[in-house]
Structure formats: C-alpha cells, structure tokens
Image: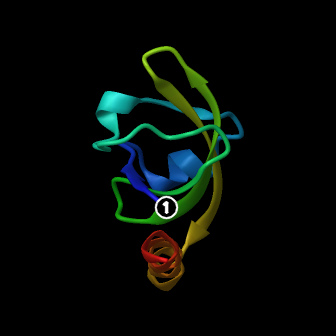
Amino acid sequence: MEVVHLPARGRELDETFRPVAVHHTDTGLTRHLERGEEIVLTDLGGDFHSAKVLLIDEGPVYHFFIGARLSVDEAAGRMSSLAESRSA
C-alpha cells in the first residue's frame, strides 16, 4: 500500500463527497497506481485517511475516493501488511 500526501486540510477531505483528483507527478510515487488500488493519504495536518483509486485519466491523474480517517496505528498496520505481502 502506498502513501500519498495531499495538499489539503483534513476537514476539507472530510467534507467532500466527490473524488479528489491528483496528478501522478504530485504524488511523489515512483510507480503508477492501478484502478481499485487502496492507499493511505496524509494531509497538511498530518492526519491519515484511507482512500481508493476510482479512476485514472490521461497524465495520469488519479481520482481518489476518500474514506475514513485512520489512526497512526491503523495506517502503520496497513503499511506493514503491504510490506509482508511483498516479501512473501
């Protein structure tokens, strides 16, 4: 699972019911994401959020569905489960 930083405040993310669009070059990722992939987002306040790639436009531009806020432990758990699955 990847972590993507969004230049937005948590409250802005909590109040949106529309997908959030982010260009790949703004994600800091070295690989491209896939449709349906689940990720962890961070915001300007340092909070974590669950998210899923709903759509990918040319560019590529990712359209994320923002899910629930995650505690630090929940975000770390998602990241460690990814690391375990990649090493298996």
Image point 43% across, 65% down: which residue? 47
Q: In this view, which residue lies farthest toward the bottom?
A: 73
Q: Which residue sits furthest front?
A: 88
* In the rendered image, the vertical position of residue 79 relative to residue 3, given as above or below: below
Which residue has dot 1 on it?
Answer: 1
Q: Tell me if residue 68 can be seen.
A: yes
Res 28 → quadrant: top left
* Number of marks in the rendered image: 1
What type is the residue that disc 1 sits on?
A: Met
Please report the residue visible at 54 percent of the width from the left and 61 percent of the height from the top. 49
| Residue 53 image point, x, y percent | 61, 41
Q: Is residue 50 left or right of residue 76?
A: right
Local packing at callout 1 (Cα closer than 10 Å; few below 14, some 14-19, many 20+) is some
The residue under the point 49% across, 77% down is: 88
Of residues 16 and 87, the one nearer the viewer is: 87
Examine the rendered structure and indicate whether residue 24 appears above or below residue 33: above
Up-down relation of residue 2 to residue 18 (above or below): below
